[in-house]
Amino acid sequence: MKLILASKNPHKLVELSAILGKLGLEIALESDYGLDIEVEETGTTFEENSLLKAEAVMKASGMPAIADDSGICVEALNGAPGIYSARYGNKGSDRERLEYLLEQMKDVPEEKRAAKFVCVITCVWPDGRKIVARGEMHGRLTFEAKGENGFGYDPIFFLPEYGMTSAELEPEVKNAISHRGKALQEFCRIYQEELNHDK
């Protein structure tokens, strides 16, 4: 089955394809279908924004569409940047947003730097079917960026059980334990259940 990913982010395509490909799902970016859809993320939760994006692309294409909405939630900042992670501080690049977050946290001691990554994946079909799956990864913010893998806030997200940042993990390890990896695993579980139910 072919799904359109409601995103222009090739990193997300790689992560989703690595896991969903095992279910026989073929994922393509919206641009591969000549679509360039800007969705105003007016939701107040990851779930709402993920649904807005998936529905917009599904309606424009007439095909099943999958979207994720994800971000980093920092305890000391009352959950910010949260759903605003991709546009935090009105900065134009991942690096600028990461540095802006570190600046906001510069006086916060290590023991109070708890944070979590959240990802919600929503898939919608033209016939009204819908799957929503959520995943979280818990850790803490570092004081400086480390690692070359991953993207976004990965270089400043430290995982105590691994002794390194998310950006220092090998991609296959990250895919297994990340918020997106967990959301995808949950998505796969629900998808398989529905397939078995339809038999």
Image (cartoon, rainbow, N blue to C red):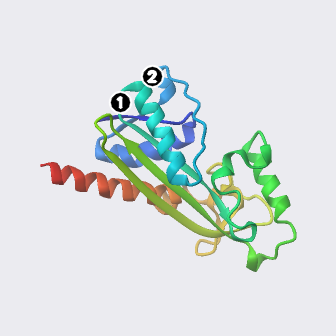
Q: Is residue 189 visible?
A: yes
120 in relation to 2, above or below: below
Q: Quadrant location of residue 123?
A: top left
Discs 2/1, front: 1
- The answer to whether residue 91 is left or right of residue 162 is right
Task: Assign the N terminus to one quadrant of the image.
Answer: top left
- The answer to whether residue 171 is left or right of residue 82 is left
* 42 vs 138, nearest the viewer: 42
Q: Distance between the residues labelled 2 and 1?
A: 10 Å
Q: Residue at x 68, y 54 (%)?
A: 153
10 Å crowding of disc 2: few (<14), some (14-19), many (20+): few
89 in relation to 13, above or below: below
Callout 2 amino acid: Tyr
Q: Which residue is drawn at 37% across and 41% down?
A: 124
112 in relation to 23, above or below: below
Q: What element carries label 1?
A: loop
Callout 2 touching callout 1 (CB < 8 Å): yes
Q: Is residue 174 visible?
A: no
- The answer to whether residue 23 is left or right of residue 116 is left
Q: Which residue is drawn at 59% across and 53% down?
A: 44
Residue position marked by numbered label 2 in the rendering: 33
Question: Which badge, 2 or 1, comes first in the chain's sequence?
Answer: 2
Callout 1 amino acid: Met
Residue position marked by numbered label 1 in the rendering: 63
